[in-house]
Amino acid sequence: MRHASRTATIYAFFRAVESNRPPHDRLFHDPYAKHFLTPVLKMWVWLSAYPLFRWFVPWYVELRWPGSITSVVARTKMIDNFTLEAIRRHGVYQVILLGAGYDTRAYRLEEEKVQFVEVDRPNTQDYKKDLLHKLGIRPFIPVDYVSVDFREQPPEKTIPGLLQQKHYKTLIIWEGAVNNLTPSLGNTMFRYFQNYPSGTRIIFNYVDRDMFAHPRRFFGASRVVRMLKKMNEQWDTGLTPETLPDFLAIYNMELLYDESATEYRRLYTGSRDHRKMRGYEFLRLAMAVVK
């Protein structure tokens, strides 16, 4: 039985590799990500701690999957910052992680005044909880778990209505949206989001629809598509950045942020040469708010 998507495992691998960088140079520290990896990936993480392999491991990943590790790492940092800003500046005290997979924000952000709710398929949640329990790893604050498979169960019938209380200030993170987005599921989820109180924020990623029609316009896109097919995790649906504000307006939402990997990589790479970081420009990160 598969515990989570292979991309969830790969993204945990990327976070683990980034966490092995020197403290002054890494974007974040996720000491838990390595526990979700296969023995082979754990070996690569172990090697990445040594100077000789510190550059080689990301280089090898980028060679096969252009732009993946740099964009995922930068996106993780940006979502971390969006989350902390929502908690500290906008009074959010409920963070809902849809398709949480191996997300560890409830364990590593260490915010006292927030409740995390993880929503995912039962087998993924059970594996994650059992593994962390065996390792003696506890979240900073107890996490609430909701088991649901959005491919078969509508969110309004499976996620407790209690989470939509009018006095709740909520942030929804749907970082895995791109992995299973279809037109019908997208409409279902955004209809669900609009029922949250005004001020609710939603962070999600999506594929620029132009990538499907013109993959050659995006560096490395063809290789990424081939890699996903081998993993049986094909991306089927995208959105058009130019029309995203109009799309969100249908669901009574306003767009707050929408940038490609090029932009959010540039924000967080620091001394790293972002001019050499190419690929994954078709994968975008957006944040909207319910009006």
Image (cartoon, rainbow, N blue to C red):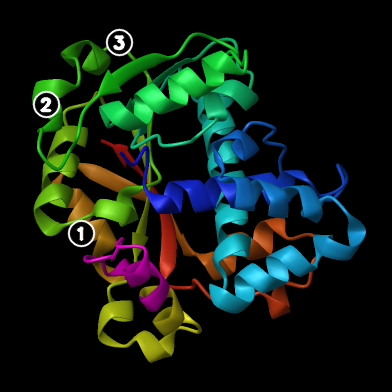
Q: Is residue 15 above or below residue 269?
A: above
Helix, strand or loop at disc 1?
helix
| Apparent side of residue 269 relative to residue 162 in the rendered image (left or right) | right
Secondary structure beneath dot 3 equals loop
Q: Is residue 240 magenta?
A: yes
At mark 2, the secondary structure is helix
- Tell me the crowding category of disc 2: few under 14, some 14 to 19, or many 20 or more residues within 10 angstroms, Cα based: some
Give the labeled residue for mark 1.
246
State which tag comes first along the sequence, 3 or 2: 2
> What crowding class fits label 1: few (fewer than 14 Cα within 10 Å), some (14-19), or many (20 or more)?
some
Q: Residue at x 37, y 41 (%)?
A: 4
Disc number lying in front (3 or 2): 2
For the residue marked with disc 2, what is the amino acid? Glu
Main secondary structure type of the part rendered in magenta: loop
Q: Is residue 87 left or right of residue 206?
A: right
Residue at the (41%, 37%) spot, across then down: 101
Across and down, in percent, residue 165 comes to: 23, 12
Q: Tell me residue 31's x, y (percent).
A: 70, 32
Q: Quadrant of the N terminus?
A: top left
Position of residue 232 relative to residue 128, above or below, is: below
* Quadrant of res 162: top left
Asked if residue 26 can be seen in this view, the reply is no
Q: Which residue is mark 3?
A: 167
Boundaries of the magenta span = 226-241
Q: Nearer the viewer, residue 129 or 241?
A: 129
Judge whether 175 appears above or below 71 on screen.
Answer: above
Closer to the eye: label 2 or 1: 2
- Which kind of residue does numbered mark 3 sit on? His
Q: Tell me, for residue 156, which label it has, or none.
A: 2
- Location of the C terminus (image quadrant): top left
Identified at 83% across, 62% down, the residue is: 53
Q: Earlier in the sequence, mark 3 or mark 1?
A: 3
